Amino acid sequence: MSESDAVFQAGSAGPAGVVKRARRVAVLSPVAWRTPPRHYGAWETVASNITEGLVARGWDVTLFATRDSITRARLHAVIDQGYEEDPAADPKVAEYLHIAAAFEHAGEFDLIHSHYDFMALSYSRLVRTPVLTTIHGFSSPKIMPVYEKYRDGYYVSISDADRAPALNYLATVYNGIDLSLYQFQERAGDDLIFLGRIHPDKGVHLAIEVARLSGRRLIIAGIVQDEVYFRAQIEPHLDGRTVDYVGAVDVAGKNALFASASALLHLNTIPERFGLVLAEANAAGVPVIAMDLGSCREVIEDGQTGFLASTPEQAVQALGRLGEIDRRACRRRVERRFSIASMVAAYEHVYARIFELEESKRG
Amino acid sequence: MSESDAVFQAGSAGPAGVVKRARRVAVLSPVAWRTPPRHYGAWETVASNITEGLVARGWDVTLFATRDSITRARLHAVIDQGYEEDPAADPKVAEYLHIAAAFEHAGEFDLIHSHYDFMALSYSRLVRTPVLTTIHGFSSPKIMPVYEKYRDGYYVSISDADRAPALNYLATVYNGIDLSLYQFQERAGDDLIFLGRIHPDKGVHLAIEVARLSGRRLIIAGIVQDEVYFRAQIEPHLDGRTVDYVGAVDVAGKNALFASASALLHLNTIPERFGLVLAEANAAGVPVIAMDLGSCREVIEDGQTGFLASTPEQAVQALGRLGEIDRRACRRRVERRFSIASMVAAYEHVYARIFELEESKRG
């Protein structure tokens, strides 16, 4: 989709002659964490970015999220805190109460934009308000029967790669990052960096292999999600010199890493659903060498903002071509395709399409 | 409630002059187990007894349950097997799909009779069909906020003891057992028996104490739910002579135990919600000595169908009074108050009240 396609004025959607009015949107965020989350919580982050972006564009938005959430939208909360942050919470109770609240108020909205996975779908046929679901990932094949049942709903995928067959997808809308958080780094550093969960899916061991083969220094940052993997395949290589692990980092820590980086290594071993960190690195001007699996070829433009590889050896070869990458072009591409503004504009386009479809249904 | 109050003809409810028609009822059973369950599964058992009882009385009933369920009603199933019996199942997916199916068909029913705990309540305000919930027990204080939110719904408690404050209870309807399963035992046997889950809540250790104090033989039957408790407080007393454990028993095994029993000991340490086994023992003519906690004083009529005790010593004293109990009166009381017929009649009364209330709402 071209940039101009994706942008339209809120409230001016619909065929000429139709009375323009402000559209009321409910954004249904998860309640595992606060919206936006304090630390981890990718779905809540995206729901927050969409909500705040829509408000900035003049939409009438109600955010259904935990009571401690922070938003410029109207907040509707029935759960005090994210159930992952509240030892007294019962996740099942929180989920049912939270989702029900949004659907019980459906009549007040022109659209419910759900980030609540398959559970919210089970309420969708009980209301007249159209429901758009952004699928942030299929957590298990066991949830597919729910999507199959509700396949005629409205869906957005977060990459072309992360799609299930036969669902009624209206678009792929890439997640947008807050570009103001990542300073552009004019000059390349010397280090290779890995940023992400320490888990075999993320191929940290392959990044170490690239460092070893190329003789380059590698700095690893992120939470340890798989302790056994960390002890067996990462820790033995940590010498504080050629391979170093610095733990989890916040935004400032990420920026410091980007400043020291010649490239981000992201040699995932399973298909990536989106890959927010790839966009973050590019936003700082850092080229990315990524495994060609899942969405990586959508986020990284091979030869322009990084390189796609299929083996650690190919990744090593790509290191020799980093000089070909224009760091400014990396940031420009993120601004164009993976910014909050581009994401919100794309969702406005999807909303407009839904309103059109709904109006034609009503005849 | 008197017996005559509770009985009315299906289809003849409502004020005089209102056109009589068959009422269509959806019974929403859990999908943890088949309905009726193969072994364990008290909620599914009751849902099944109500369904079959209503069908026998001429109601138009649709049972929402697993596909392998057995019923004379219309079966609506979206889940093949109980999630407790199917290793491939995802309980959360099964629950959402199953409950949603019932509510998506709400328009086809005059009443949804839910046995699905707090989860089904969260859909209840999205349909016009009234929803009656039989509360089979409050599994945790954490679920109470859902009941508080939906307190204006229609509720039935399974004993006067097992009620939460401020809920809109229409009645207590005692669970009904299938009396044809339990033969009346004319003559008392010699043994004391315990029947139930081996768990501290059920006071198996107190039954052993009564056996020891009285010098009577005790036979224990039931599944071991608390292994640590069994090893520490039950097993050391098993000598195969004065205290014996025979494992889990089916209906035939229960009847054999009832035939050998002078009394059933049920010295629960927490309030009983209903106590199906007390009614089963009484159905066979076996008097029950029960702790005076929760619903026991509702199921057992002190001095008539057994004795209530507050300590093991009082239970021992009661053993000396077993001769006062008329075994035929025990069975008669079960027939009158805890049979499928009495349960179904009581629910018909509740349904009629709901239809009246709904009609007066419509004005």
Image (cartoon, coloured by chain):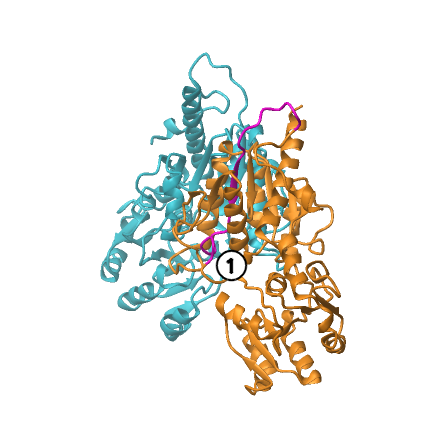
Chain colours: A orange, B cyan
Q: Is residue B97 magenta?
A: no
**Which residue is disc 1 drawn over?**
A41
Residue A5 image position (x, y, % from top left)? 69, 42
Span highlighted in magenta in the image:
A15-37
Could you say where residue A228 lies in the image, as x and y percent from the top left? 57, 78
Front residue (pair B10, A217): A217
For image coordinates 63% across by 42% down, the residue present is B77
Residue A231 higher or lower than B97, as above or below: below
Q: Position of residue A145 (x, y in %)?
A: 66, 49
Helix, strand or loop: magenta stretch: loop
Which amino acid does the dot numbered 1 rest on? Answer: Gly
| Residue A36 drawn in magenta | yes
Q: Quadrant of the C terminus of chain A?
A: top right
Work out whether residue B186 can be spotted. no
User: Which chain is mark 1 on?
Assistant: A
**A300 displayed left or right of B94:** right
